[in-house]
Image: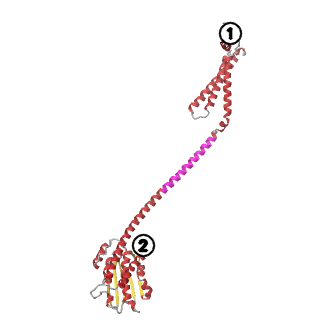
Amino acid sequence: MVPADIGSPTGLEIAALQTLLDFTQYMPHGMCLLWEPWLLILWAGSDMLIFLAYFAIPLALLKVLRQRTDLKHRGLVWLFASFILLCGLTHALSIVTLWWPIYPVHGFVKLATALVSASTAVVLFKLVPVLVAIPSRRELELANSKLLDEVAAHEATLNVLRQARHELEVQVEERTAELRNVNAKLAVTAREAVHRSHNMIAVVSSMARQSARGVSDVSQFIDTFTGRLNALASATQTVMKEPTGASADLADIVRSQLEPVLLTFGDRMSVEGPEVATGQEAAQQISLALHELATNAQKYGSLNAEDARIRVSWSLSGDSAGEKRLQLRWEEDVPQLPEEALDGAGTGRTGFGTRLLTQIVPSMLQGTARRTVDGGKLVYELDVPLAALAEAEGQAEHVKLASRIVGQDFGFA
């Protein structure tokens, strides 16, 4: 072979290539081992085992990278795989050099191994703080245990909140139902108030017309009408004072209506009777009757005589199987009762006061009444069903009957 011109670039390349491929000037490494078979086997076997191990380790690392795509610092793993693979390759070339002295190739592989291993070392040292900060298995187990405890605590809190929400929903439903009931009761009360006010207006209007009949003196009409109006107001006020506002004891109604007389002539009057619950409309009717009787007593009756007395009493009759009734009795001493005080009793004429006592009031209360004068005594007796005292509805027929009796339409609903 003719040597090329070494001064040219092509000659330098050819010379370098000849230097790398011309191994004849070197001797195999086996000669250093004197070609001892056991040394050759020991040397080549060890390098072969190291090569196989170094070749398997990068394969395992690459498999981990493929299955764990979430791992960080993947470049460091690639450097480790390359470094270990190159180390294994140097051991494989060491086996070859035992028989073929390819030392230049072996040297270049070692150079590549050195560069990769140095790069790996530099990167590894830079990542030391990061790698040290990676939690250990024990720390991860502790953190996981804490997380499980927190999850359990949150679950318990959620259960408490669910229970509280359920209880709150139940309370809201209960309160809503209560509000519905209250609204329904208010609606009924409002309708009842309208009904009562309509009836009251009708009563006052009719009473005004009846009180004005045959009266030529305006002051007399005002006194009569105002007295009867106050009787209605007093009865209503007595009932409304009670906590329920639906009924009051009959004794309270009687004493409230007769209060002015009791304060003046208390030692000559007596009021007694059992406890009887009385509704507003019944209280108004009984108060009108007591007002008429008390007014006549002050004008013409016992209150003008020093020794005369008035006894107001009531009692209940009937058993549990039959209808219970109330008997109200007004007994008044009248030694010398003028004829005009009788208001038609035995004279053939009937005034509004008498019609009120003997016709209107008993008709409104679904009962009967009687007024008599005998033996120096004026007795008024009112007999009504006990159930009528508490009834606030269903009295339209009795009101119409009372209206026909007095010849006037009261206009009750």
242 to 8, vertically: above or below: below
Quadrant containing the N terminus is: top right
185 to 398, vertically: above or below: above
Three-letter amino acid code of the residue under disc 1:
Asp
Question: Crowdedness of circle 1 by 10 Å Cα count: few (<14), some, many (20+)?
Answer: few
Position in image of residue 353 (x %, y %): 33, 83
Position in image of residue 253 (x %, y %): 41, 79
Identify the residue shown where x is 62% and y is 41%. Answer: 140
- The reply to whether callout 1 and callout 2 are in contact (CB within 8 Å) is no
Q: Nearer the viewer, residue 11 or 290?
A: 11
319 to 156, vertically: above or below: below
**Tag nearer the camera, 1 or 2:** 1
Identify the residue shown where x is 58% and y is 47%. Answer: 150
The region drawn magenta spans 139-168
In space, the residues marked 1 and 2 are separated at their CA atoms by: 135 Å
Q: Quadrant of residue 28?
A: top right
User: Is residue 149 highlighted in magenta?
Assistant: yes
* Residue 5, numbered circle: 1
Q: Earlier in the sequence, mark 1 or mark 2?
A: 1
* In this rendering, position of residue 106 left or right of residue 260: right
Position in image of residue 218 (x %, y %): 35, 84
Position in image of residue 81 (x %, y %): 62, 27
Q: Is residue 387 visible?
A: no
Q: Nearer the viewer, residue 77 or 383?
A: 77
* In this rendering, position of residue 333 left or right of residue 58: left
Three-letter amino acid code of the residue under disc 2:
Gly
Residue underneath mark 2: 245
* In this rendering, position of residue 168 left or right of residue 132: left
